[in-house]
Image (spheres, helix red, strand yellow):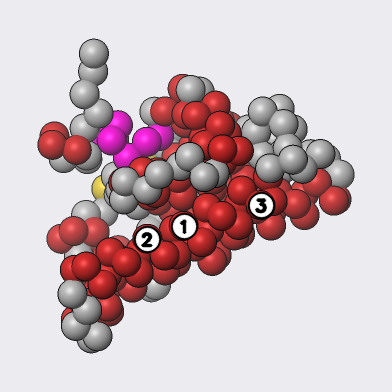
Amino acid sequence: MKFFSFWRSLASFRVRIALNLKNLPAEVVFIDLDANAQRGEDYRRVNPQMALPSLVLDDGTVLFQSLAILEYLEETHPAPPLLPSDPRGRARVRGLAQMVACEGHPLLTPRVRRYLDHELNLRDTQQAAWRRHWTVETLAALEGHLADHKDTGRFCHGDAPGMADICLVTHVTAAVNQQIDLAPYPAVKRIFETAMALPEFASAHPSMQPDTPEAMRKKKG
């Protein structure tokens, strides 16, 4: 498999975690979003949407959109599971995942930020307020669904990490990057810290990638 990724792409972060949890190796191809490499002809042929991530299977099939990729990995490599075994549990986990991947995160992507800047001429402070608003709204929604829910365990659903945790971790990472206080979201904060203590999550973090700029790397010690 070839995995097209960028160090700070949150959607790529989600797929990195899933590949780690499933223990699936992939050849990583780095697409520099800061250099607009996703708009180059080579990558446009891979994914006409010019968005990350993409996963190219050994037979040349191109998978795109992070949740679709996660679903594919779950169906083809079911152990360890990313989804519960019961229909209601799967619906809950998918709903939590989609709150991030389909509602919160799309409003924070580079192409949205580019539009706010180039087309609407919003000042940096206005753009920061935009990002903070949508990040906090999603944090609050996650907290409301997770806190005191009977199916919330060590993780979003039960005591093993799954699709919802993968999405939660990437969203909280965006919140941390914006220096948003997580104290009002204790369930979210606890699950984030529990997940990030696992090597499969920690090694997938944006600060730990081969293409991460040196200044953005997590310092040891």
How busy is the neighbourhood of tag 1: few (under 14 within 10 Å), some, or many (20 plus)?
some
The residue at 32%/40% (across/down) is 206
How busy is the neighbourhood of tag 2: few (under 14 within 10 Å), some, or many (20 plus)?
some
Q: Are marks 2 and 1 in contact (CB under 8 Å)?
A: yes
The residue at 23%/86% (across/down) is 119
Q: Position of residue 203 (x, y in %)?
A: 39, 28
Callout 1 secondary element: helix
Whole-angstrom CA distance, mark 3 to mark 1, is: 12 Å
Q: In the picture, which quadrant includes the C terminus?
A: top left
Q: Residue beneath label 2, please?
A: 132
Is residue 209 in the magenta section? yes
Q: Residue beneath label 3, please?
A: 144
**Left or right of 164 in this view: 130:** left
**Left or right of 37 in this view: 167:** right
- Is 198 drawn above or below residue 96 in the view shown? above
Q: Residue beneath label 1, please?
A: 136
Q: Amino acid under label 1?
A: Val
First-in-chain label (2 vs 3): 2
Q: Amino acid under label 2?
A: Arg
Whole-angstrom CA distance, mark 2 to mark 1, is: 6 Å
Q: Amino acid under label 3?
A: Gly
Query: What is the span of residues highlighted in magenta in the rendered image?
Result: 204-210
Q: Position of residue 156 (x, y in %)?
A: 66, 39
